[in-house]
Structure formats: structure tokens, C-alpha cells
Amino acid sequence: MRSINGTGLIVAGLAATLAALLFPLWSYADRSGTGLDALNSQTVSTRFGPLSALDRDFVTKVRLAGLWELPAGQQAQERGTRASVRRAGEHLVTGHTFLDARVREVAARLNLELPNQPNSQQRQWLGELDAAHGDAYDEKFANILRGAHGKVFSVVAQVRATTRNSLVRELADDANTTVLDHIKVLEATGLVDFDDLARDAASAPPSAPATSTPPPPGPTDSPAPATPVTPSPTYSLPPAASRPKPAHPEKQQKQQKRQKQREHQEGQEGQKGQKAQKEQPKRHTASTS
């Protein structure tokens, strides 16, 4: 009896060992959905280079960012109680006006259809900002927008590092410059809770695998035109255009020098005016005596 039990244990142990050895082979050899498989199956060819699912998702995200961050920036210009918050709002309006024109241009050349409404999360953020006022509004604006920009910043970096499409690469360059500018100007408000940002990042669930959701739609023969985002009902965006050429370094230095000279001159004139105002009562007293 003991011999039979011992033999059974040995057989069971050998079976478990064999299963452990075979499981990795089965799980990887027969499974589709690895990173390389997803890249190959979800990439489409364009004359600007291969267009991956990540590329298409990035183009959509750039468009979505403008659909809610531009109106949020305009609202901050009107409702912000601090000058730094109003300045951050101005940067958001300027940056996303430019970036929205760029993403519409890229999408049109790649035959990609773009959304015309913010997603549910973005509408929720806009609702929170609508309900806030005073100091509470300033804090919500700085932290909600800084958190959102921090999340998209890593996506921009990943796309810029891996894309094989020249149009997407150029858009990633523009997005990187714009997002970093917005991060800095939001942090300059002095209201960003960095501890909360760190806790939020640490508690965030891991990213879903690339194959867990359907890939973004690819190019279509006749995509619906994307409506330009506008900072106000009376302001319309210019048609999509190529990226503005950066100013020549020497020309930019001269412009900055002239600006400093003007500011210095204005400061001296202001000091002279204040001095003259102080001297007027003295002269009046001397003349009456």
C-alpha cells in the first residue's frame, strides 16, 4: 500500500513538472497579441511611412486635448483670481490654437477622422471647473490641467521615440514643445500639489495591453472634416498651416534686447513722473509763501 502511494506521488510530481515546462511554450507559441504581433497587424502603410495604432491614437489624443484645454484656458483668463492663473490660461489658448491647426492638417493628409467633442473624462473636468470659483477655481485649474498634461507628456515621448511616420514625428515635436510649455506655466502658479501627482501616478492601474481594445480607425477615403476649436464664439481659427519657422537666433536676441531697452525706458519715465508729482506740492508751498 505504501509502495502504491509512493509511486502515485512520484507520478504526480513528474506530471506537474512536465506541465510547468510546457505551459510557457503553449502560452507564447500559440498566442497572438504580443507587442510585435500587434505592431504588425495594426499598422497601415502611407506615403509618409508606416502608421501604427499608437500613431493614430496619438493624433486623436492631440485633437481631444484641444477640445477641452482651449476652452479651459479661456475660462481661466476670465475667472482666474491670480495673474499667474490667467497667464497659464493664455498659454493654453495660444498653444492649442496652434496645435489644433497642426493636428487637423496632419489628419487631413493621412485621411484620418478626428473627434469633434471632448471625451467623458474631459467633460467631467470641465464640469468641475465650471462649478468652482475664487481660490478654489485657481487650485482646481492648476492641478487638473497639470495632471492631464503630465499623463500626455509620456505618450508624446513614446510616440516621438518610436514612430516611423514623418508627419506624426513632426506633430510629436510640436506637441512636446507645447505640452512642456503648459506644464511649466501651470507649475509657475505655485498651486500644483506635487505630492498628489505622485500619489496619483503610483496608484494608477497598469496600462492595458495593446490588444485589449480595438485599434484606432485607420485612414478612410473621405473622412468627415474636423471642426476647428475656437476660444470664443467670435473668434475663428485660421486654416491649418505648416509649423511656423523658428526665429533666427541673432534676430531673436536683437528683439529681446530692444524689448528690454523699451522696458527700461518706460521704467525711467515712470520714475520721472513720480518724482515730478512729489515736487509739485513743494513748489506750490514755496510760491504761496
Image (cartoon, rainbow, N blue to C red):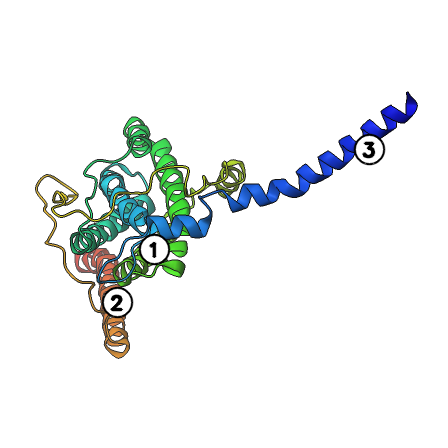
Q: Residue at x 27, y 29 (%)?
A: 130
Q: Distance between the residues labelled 3 and 1?
A: 66 Å
Q: Nearer the viewer, residue 11 or 245?
A: 11
Along the viewing direction, whichever of 222 and 41 lies nearer the viewer: 41
> Residue 96: image x %, image y %?
24, 49
Q: Residue 10 carries which label?
A: 3
Rendered view: 52 above or below 33: below
List the single residue furthest toward the left. Answer: 234
- Please tell me whether mark 3 or mark 2 is closer to you in this view: 3
Report, in whole angstroms, how far the alpha carbon at label 2 lies from the one at label 1. Answer: 32 Å
Residue on which the image places disc 2? 268
Report whether 272 appears left or right of 144. Answer: left
Q: How crowded is mark 2: few (under 14 residues within 10 Å), some or many (20 or more)?
A: few
Q: What residue type is labelled 3?
A: Ile
Label 1 sits on residue: 181
Q: Percent position (x, y) of residue 157?
A: 40, 56
Kind of element beneath mark 3: helix
